[in-house]
Amino acid sequence: MQVNSFSLRPTILSLAIMAAFSQSSFAQTATPLNAEPAEKADAKAAEPKMQKVEVQGTRNYDERRQDTATKIVVTQEDIVRYGDTTVSEVLKRLPGVTMGGVQGRGGDIRMRGLGAGYTQIMLNGEPSPPGFSLDSLSPDLIERLEIIRAATAELSTASIAGSINIVLKKSVQTAQKELKLGLFEDGGKFGENINYQVSDKAGRMSYSISGNLNHGQYERPSYSDEVRMDANGNPFVKTHTYNLGWGTFSNVGFSPRVNWNFENGDTLTTQSFVNANRFDGYSTDVRTNDPNFNGLLPMYSSDLQKIHSDFSMLRTNLNWIHKLEDSAKLDVKLGVNYNKRNSDVGFAGYNKDNAQILDRKSISGATDKGLTMSGKYSAPFVQDHSFVFGWDGAYSKRSETRTQKDNVDFVANTLSVFPLSANNLDENFNADVTRLAVFAQDEWNITKQWSVYGGLRWEGIDTRSSGSFKSPIPNANNTPYDIHNRFSVWSPILQTLYKLPDSKNDQIRLGITRTYKAPDTSRLIPRRFYSNDNTRNNPDSQGNPNLKPELAWGLDMAYEHYLPGGGMLSASVFLRKINDITRTDSSEDINGKWVSMPVNDGQATTKGIELEAKFPLRAMMEGAPAIDFRANVSFNWSSLSSVPGPNNRLDSQTPISANLGVDYKMDKIPLTVGGNASFQSGGPVNISAVQSSYSVPKRVLDLYALWKFDPKTNLRVSLGNLLHQDNINVGSFSGANGSVQTNLTPTTVTARVMFEHKF
């Protein structure tokens, strides 16, 4: 057993922050005393006599402008504007948010250009459960999106770059039914989606039920060229690979919610989310060698892979809000989640004569079970203060099994990783993760112009994993492992909002935060995943049980100017100092095979500037058309102490990203049209002293049109990725036995038509 344990105690800065608040308590991100808290609005939403008043009051409260803790709120109207079918398509247009991977196909979500765990994704204020995919969530189920640039004590501080909180629909304003029917096309392949919502009230009870169904097909080609060097740096192999992937996918989701209001003012809410996915895909690779080079052929000249996967998820929460004397309140949440995945993968490998030399069958399954419990007690002990004390705990258990059987009774192949024989590769894996946090926070309205938010959070994570895996070496015994990792973090937080006294529309923000990035459980496991064709650019991968979390101090500053009609201009800067950064190291093992492994290696600094503007033209020019403009641009820089420069960026950070959007609502006809152009720069990145990569910039153009037949019936048409730019990236290793691999993936234009009707 191996234990990594350390605890970060409050530093001088954290003690100074605590001393600045003589009450030694810290605050909720929430609302100033002169504004209704969001929870209170939700609690009263179902009361027939007060509902209209509460809903209107909540709409008039601008969280971004009035909250001391910085937050960008994206409303449901903005979420559904382009008729997107996945959340990732919505997020790519938001300020400071970028997407990794191929444009138009989703990818890892990044804030400040950073992904891979630096950006925290939350669902209703809780970290998203293991195995959860954003693309399984329909945008129609979302009430709002919150972009949280600076951490708060109430939410997990595993957010070095920031957090994106997805808030599912809660409030029931009026009884209604809504049906959406859609068709979409992508690269000549078609699909359809259906969304249905119904909400109503019965006495003190209100309920809403939402459901969605998606089905589609895809076909995606890609190309790769690899050049390998000998010990003298001369090219001796040049391989071209053509890949074609195709298949079908289906998704069904169901989300019921019930809210009870009791006579004593208490509320009880239960909300569930059920989702099931099925995927059937095929992928084929055909490799050819340049005849001008006399190097060895790849292990497989061609291959065919078949994948069948089923995934199901259940998540349910129970929320009780109990009102106490003197406006105090107790808010308690209980949650249960369950995920299950089964995959069946077949791999057939062929030699240069098109004779089959490998038939591999792999079956894997994984289940995730989890419990969450959180609570907070809030009370106005002192005038102009809003104190909150709370806790947040979670327990999850993951079990995973994998069996692999190789049939090699074909033509002999001397280039296999190991001598070919009928090998079985069986693995099992269990992990228990326990998370516990306690926090205190306070929001203090010092004057009408100046408010201060202070918080302190302690968060600890305990991970226990065990299992065994079998080497593909013939007659090898199973290798067991048992690993225990534990760490904890103190996170002092200070944020302040100052409204300039000579202006009602100008304000300044400042935030100091302590955040962290915990290693994924899968990256702590020492089991090895074997590549079908082991090279420097395609190595085996293995976890590292000695990984430590990354810890960061952060500084955020912003200036905001608000315009008439809901417009605003803002400029913000950020700085993060990160210790024990994690990077991927590739090296050769004793058998001469390449293996990639995550390691802690040095310090990193990341900083940036973010500019944002949005305004309705009519608020600036009398008699102008009903045109709304929105634009944002982000500049990011970073450097690693352990990687030589230049271009030693952190996690292939996006240097520049920008969005420009326009919406035009016509006066004489019920038509609204708009579009969004986005840009993500690429360029070279030094990953290590010998490894580098290069990617071309990404440019995406989306357009939409909305026709309102009547107040209850709409037709929405949208076109995505109109530029259909090829995605190109290059990976290279310098020195002896170096290589250069160039990957090109064409993209396609997507078209959607959505009919929407409210009953």
Image (spheres, helix red, strand yellow):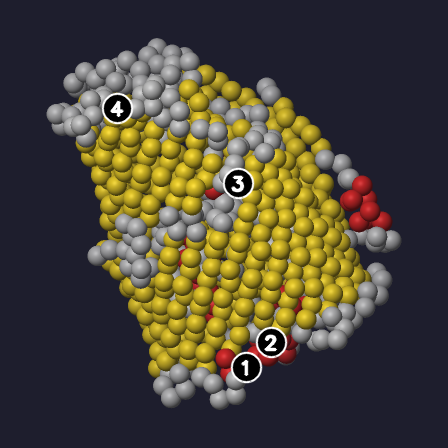
Q: Bin the neighbour count of mark 1 within 10 Å (Cα to Cα): few under 14, some 14-19, many 20 and up.
A: few
Instruction: Residue 324: give its label.
Output: none
Sooner in the amino-acid sequence: mark 2 or mark 4: 4
Image quarter for residue 426?
top left
Q: Position of residue 521 (x, y in %)?
A: 53, 33
Measured in 3D between alpha carbons, the distance from the residue under mark 3 to the one under mark 4, in whole angstroms, is 33 Å
Q: Which residue is mark 3?
A: 650
Q: Bin the neighbour count of mark 3 within 10 Å (Cα to Cα): few under 14, some 14-19, many 20 and up.
A: many
Examine the rendering and report whether any part of residue 558 can be seen.
yes
Sooner in the amino-acid sequence: mark 3 or mark 4: 4
Q: Residue furthest right?
A: 22
Along the line of sight, which residue is nearer the eye, 309 or 652? 652
Kind of residue at badge 1: Met
Q: Residue at x 53, y 40 (%)?
A: 650
Instruction: Residue 236: give its label.
Output: 4
> Badges 2 and 1: C-beta atoms under 8 Å apart?
yes
Measured in 3D between alpha carbons, the distance from the residue under mark 1 to the one under mark 3, in whole angstroms, is 41 Å
Sooner in the amino-acid sequence: mark 2 or mark 3: 2
Q: Nearer the viewer, mark 2 or mark 4?
A: 4
**From the viewer's perspective, is 376 left or right of 219?**
right
> Badges 1 and 3: C-beta atoms under 8 Å apart?
no
Q: Position of residue 299 (x, y in %)?
A: 24, 24
Instruction: Residue 563: give its label.
Output: 2
Q: Position of residue 165 (x, y in %)?
A: 56, 55
Image quarter for residue 731?
top left
Please say if 160 is above or below 296. Answer: below
Kind of residue at badge 4: Phe
Please say if 675 is above or below 521. Answer: below
